[in-house]
Amino acid sequence: MKLAGFLPVLLALPTLAQSTGPHGTRIGQIQTATLTESRPDPHVQFETWVVHMSRDYAESVVTGNTGIEREAGKAIVHRFVRDNFRNAYLTYTITFEPIPGTETFRVAFSDSTVPYPVSQVLRDGETIALNLAFDAQTGRKMIDYIRVGTGVMKPRQDPARDVYAEDAELTIAQPRLRTNGIEQAAADLPARVSAPVVSVDIPGQGRYLLSFKPRSEDGFERAGEAAGNSVVFSLDGNIFRIDCADRIASGSGTYNIYAKRDQAPKSDPPDNSGRVTFAAQP
């Protein structure tokens, strides 16, 4: 095992280093770490975004990697995020392993001061959103977007936002499901489901209810995002990715997804929901 050295800590973040979108501010530059010493690929990128915080608040956040350990077939990155205004210091360790003979990577978290998902399998260029901090009263949040792959990977333009329309519906067309990166078998799925609440039955996991609206009075929580033809949500440490044949939302942005586990999965789903059921693995 070889320690690649202590990466310099950023003591100040110049204004020009930030990227501001309509709904959030990216902290500093995109930070890149190569997973091998001899080649630029594969590599991992880290983007930290703050949402609903003043620019002064955003400028108080410092991020970086304290080191990279490279072993045969894997790389271990030690990551930190520090908030100088609130004296918060968040850390986690993330391990990347290219899976031989595929264009996928196994990604696992450990030694974390924030909740993290179970081990994931990511395809080249895919992203994990790791929630670092969230204030339920103000809606303020801080997120690390972790992207792994080869070649040029497209940066984010903005974090996810809420859908404005009160009657917004999710459209699920010819869906394909992956649980923690592993593709799941499809059942006799409907060609298209469109509803304000979509009920998704996942083998071995249970039933989840998805919505674009917060519905906090019904126990929903912010669990992921929808963009283009894909919706990704995370509950109970698992990450579920549903890829569809058409757009999930009528708009072209990236939207928050709210979800909850249905505590009575043997009953019929809510009246305003559509239902998607995936099959158990053979």
Image: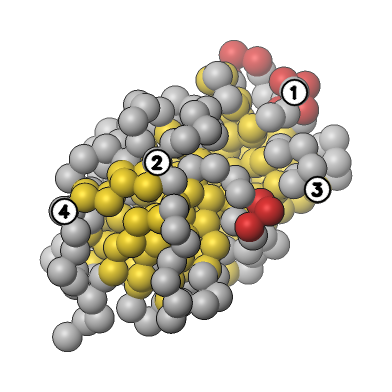
Q: Earlier in the sequence, mark 2 or mark 1?
A: 1
The disc placed on residue 191 is 4
Check disc 3: other Cα within 10 Å, few if <14, some if 14-19, many if 20+: few
Residue 175 as seen in the image, left or right of residue 49: left
* Residue to which mark 2 is pinned: 169
* Tag 3–tag 2 contact (CB < 8 Å): no
Seen in the picture, residue 120 relative to 89 is either above or below; the reply is below
The extreme front residue here reads: 271
Assign a secondary structure to mark 3.
strand
Q: Is residue 240 visible?
A: no
Q: Nearer the viewer, mark 4 or mark 1?
A: 4
Query: In the rendered structure, which amino acid carries the disc numbered 4?
Result: Ala
* Horizontal and vertical percent position of residue 89: 76, 50
Assign a secondary structure to mark 1.
loop
Distance, label 4 to label 1, CA atoms, is 44 Å
| Near-viewer residue (193 or 236) | 193
* Horizontal and vertical percent position of residue 120: 39, 66
